[in-house]
Amino acid sequence: MMVRNVVIGMLFVTVIAPIVLYTDRLGTFPTFSSSSSSNDFVEDVTTFAFNGETGRLNVLSQESSSKFKESIGMVYSDNSHHQSLSDSSKVILESSTDTGNSKKDLLLGESREHASARVLSTTNEENRSMSENAIKQVTDDEIEDGNQVKPDTDTEGDGKDDAMGTDSKEIQKQINDVSGDTAAKHEQTTESSVRLVKREPAKTRPEKQNERVAIPDARVRHLKDQLVRARVYLSLPATRNNPHFTRELRLRVKEVQRVLGDASKDSELGKNSYDKLKAMEQTLTKGRQIQDDCASAVKKLRAMLHSTEEQLRVHKKQTLFLTQLTAKTLPKGLHCLPLRLTTEYYTLNTSEQNFPNQEKLEDPQLYHYALFSDNVLAAAVVVNSTITRAKDPAKHVFHIVTDRLNYAAMRMWFLVNPPGKATIQVQNIEEFTWLNASYSPVLKQLASQSMIDYYFRTHRASSDSNLKFRNPKYLSILNHLRFYLPEIFPKLNKVLFLDDDIVVQKDLTGLWSLDMKGNVNGAVETCGESFHRFDRYLNFSNPLIAKNFDPRACGWAYGMNIFDLDEWKRQNITDVYHSWQKLNRDRQLWKLGTLPPGLITFWKRTFPLDKSWHVLGLGYNPSVSQKDIERAAVIHYNGNMKPWLEIGISKYRNYWAKHVDYDHLYLRDCNINP
């Protein structure tokens, strides 16, 4: 009961007594205020809010509190405005003190009461919360911009002592001016705040977007990181000395390993993965508390990093070797196909083994193609795609040269699948009796003991470690026939050379009408990238190479080349090739292959074709432009990822596969599928 009395007494002193005091004091206003401006000021004092409720004074008439609520919002919407109002009240206080007028003291007291009412009104928790949130929002926005908000200052505040008089009307006018300035500043502050708030989404949007960008498969990464940390803790002395924690940690490791399994994406994890992650994190936290030797942890992490880097190096080397091995190895289906075709070929009568239209083989008025391949299916795609795009297939002649093992199979395929009205010739390289070691230096080199050692004794220290140059195609003379085109086709003027890993997408007859300006070879240049320049293929540390060639000269590509055989003969290109091959018998000028000697042989004899004729990289580069592919006349699967291999780039495979009839009897028998 005593506590209740004390509370009631304090309530009377703090609330009721000031109200009575204000009422008694304000009762003297009518005797003082004669001007309308003074009455307006007094009327503002009659309305105040306490704890969100409107109080009514007994002497003065009560009016709506909506206007005063706006002043409350104004006070807390911007600190600068509150400071400006306080400064203005201070100026009025000093001015009224200097004059010593009792009426001004009364007005000053009333202004204090007005300010007190404002302070009381701020006890409303809801309004305060809303105001503080608005201030914080604007302030945070300004801090993010890196700019400090400059408080509004009243430029008319300077020299107000001179403007103050002793007349109450002047005092009242000054107060009204201050109120007007304050209201104007409130409107400006409000507009500025609104502008800042409106700009806030635009400024914070990038940050929000960055926050939303989650690390892909973050949970899988987190679980793997936990396993690494667990292995570190298990190897430290402090952990080994705590058997209970060791058992717990090993249990968590097994749980995480079971949950993780072979998952590489978060979607592949089980439903309990998050629980196991949390349990492991709690156990690792214990380990962090147990382990106080940071040096040991750092040492162990460095050892693990070194071991991981070494494993990565080994795996990269194994991957390279296996990729090269896959590129060299013939798939089972493609091995079955020539066997099946060869068997069928030798069951035919002699009259059935011949191709029609053989009179067209030496007609220089037709469009002749040279294709050297031991891959039946690849050669079939080249022929089919070319005929499909040709405007007049009857004028196209295909000269295919293969080895002895695939000769019967190649002939059988095109006998069973004739290319429409086009003409086909299949030749066996063994029939070129003029191509022997006494005539061709490269044949002599391929049969030498040093070449055999280079290929088959790879364990020797002197052996080149680059597996790229150990592809069996470099041992095949088929790969070097491109340097003997005039000898193979002595009665032709121009020949279009095609690799067997290309697909034709447009009619190619326009190449025969090109003016090559006296050049022998027409090819697409590949110097868009630095590794396709001469210094990539030739050994410029050799003075012979450095003296005769430019290391930054632009390279070009084999795969689709138009050769002017008349110019070839006139400039004696075959002898140029032979002379450089003899100089490179010890492989000091270039490694094995046909492009380096081609760059040398056709140096300053190559006519650059438009890049749209020949687009390369589909056998190694997954980023070839789709636009370039679509507008290309020929696309080239150069590289190890051939479209007929499982390692081929899947998104490019359909360009090749659409020219293969997988429902063909022979393909089904050999289980060759898309």
Image (spheres, rainbow, N blue to C red):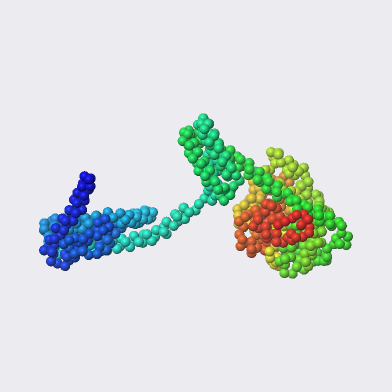
Q: Residue at x 70, y 53 (%)?
A: 645
Left or right: residue 634 versus residue 665 is left
Image-quadrant location for residue 363: bottom right
| Residue at screen point 61% across, 59% down | 625
Residue 84 percent location from the top left of the image: 25, 57
Q: Which is nearer the eye, 504 or 45? A: 45
At horizontal 65% and vertical 63% (from top left) the residue drawn is 632
Indicate the position of residue 391 as horizontal and vertical percent values: 72, 69
- Identify which residue, 496 or 39, lies in the foreground: 39
Quadrant containing the C terminus in the rendered view: bottom right
The residue nearer to you, when weighing 346 against 631, is 346
Does the image show residue 313?
yes
Quadrant of image for the N terminus? top left
Whole-percent x, y for residue 601 in the image: 71, 55
Does 521 sit left or right of 40 as displayed?
right
**Residue 555, relative to residue 509: is it above or below?**
above
Observer able to see residue 482? no
Above or below, comparing residue 446 to residue 294 in the picture = below
Q: Quadrant of residue 338?
A: bottom right
The reply, left or right, for residue 338 in relation to residue 213 is right
